Image: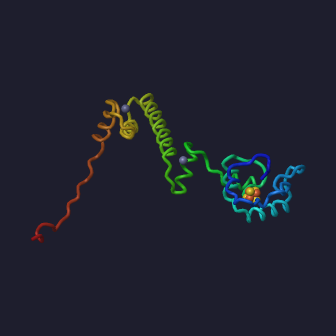
Amino acid sequence: MIDAAIPDFLLALPAGTRTPCHGRGELYIHPIRSAPTKADTVEAKALCAQCPIKAACAEHAIRHGETDGIWGGLTPAERRARRRPDCGTEPGWRSHLSLGQSCLTCREAHDDRLREQRLKRLEHEHATHGGSLAGYRLERLLGLPTCVRCRAVRQEYYAARPQPRRWHRHGQGSAAA
Ligand code: SF4
Ligand SMILES: [Zn+2]
Ligand SMILES: [Zn+2]
């Protein structure tokens, strides 16, 4: 962490205390070396491990996409790996799903995208085939009235299909009281 701007999460620090990184900025972002040494990183992480606001510090850096230095005990690569995709995007929706979370913003955005995709596919079905079974299914999924051409294809399809064989069970009826 660097001392240039005071981020909000530092306000959670108990009064009269300092963060373990205070005055040790060179371990976190070295003024000359572009990459930290392994020893600096190990020491910086050890200091962060004792910090009362470690989780908030990491969260702040991840949320703000801080690219340099150690924050909350995490290196830039470790922060990138933990970065949650933005809400409202497909990766955001998938990330909630994998964590078993529900998010209204992501679900609504996902549903909107799904609807758009289905509308496009329906348009394509109509343009290429006139009417089709897939078109009929899409119309039902989209809650639209089914069109005459898709209905006709579907009726033809079911009329041409062999009737399923009916099975009868034997030996029933006589034993019933
Ligand atoms: S977690 Fe580490 S970088 Fe963040 S304030 Fe604490 S000691 Fe400093
Ligand atoms: Zn979300
Ligand atoms: Zn149709």
Q: Position of residue 149 (x, y in %)?
A: 34, 30
Farthest residue in the front direction?
A: 16
Q: How is the image coloured?
A: rainbow
Farthest residue in the right direction?
A: 32
Compared to residue 106, the image places residue 82 above or below, namely below
Q: Nearer the viewer, residue 90 or 17?
A: 17
Q: Is residue 73 visible?
A: no
Drawn side of residue 8 relative to residue 41, left or right: left
Compared to residue 148, the image places residue 159 above or below, namely below
**Quadrant containing the C terminus in the rendered view:** bottom left
Q: Nearer the viewer, residue 147 or 155?
A: 147
Count all numbered tags in the image, as a single digit.
Answer: 0
Residue at 36% x, 34% y: name it: 144
Drawn side of residue 155 relative to residue 124, left or right: left
Residue at 75% x, 61% y: name it: 48
Query: Ligand 3 lies in which image quarter?
Result: top left
Compared to residue 116, the image places residue 74 above or below, namely below
Residue at 57% x, 52% y: name it: 95
Farthest residue in the left direction?
A: 177
Q: Position of residue 73 (x, y in %)?
A: 74, 59
Q: Is residue 100 visible?
A: yes
Q: Position of residue 153 (x, y in %)?
A: 33, 35
Drawn side of residue 50 relative to residue 117, left or right: right
Residue at 39% x, 29% y: name it: 130
Q: Position of residue 86 (x, y in %)?
A: 60, 45
Q: Nearer the viewer, residue 62 or 121?
A: 62
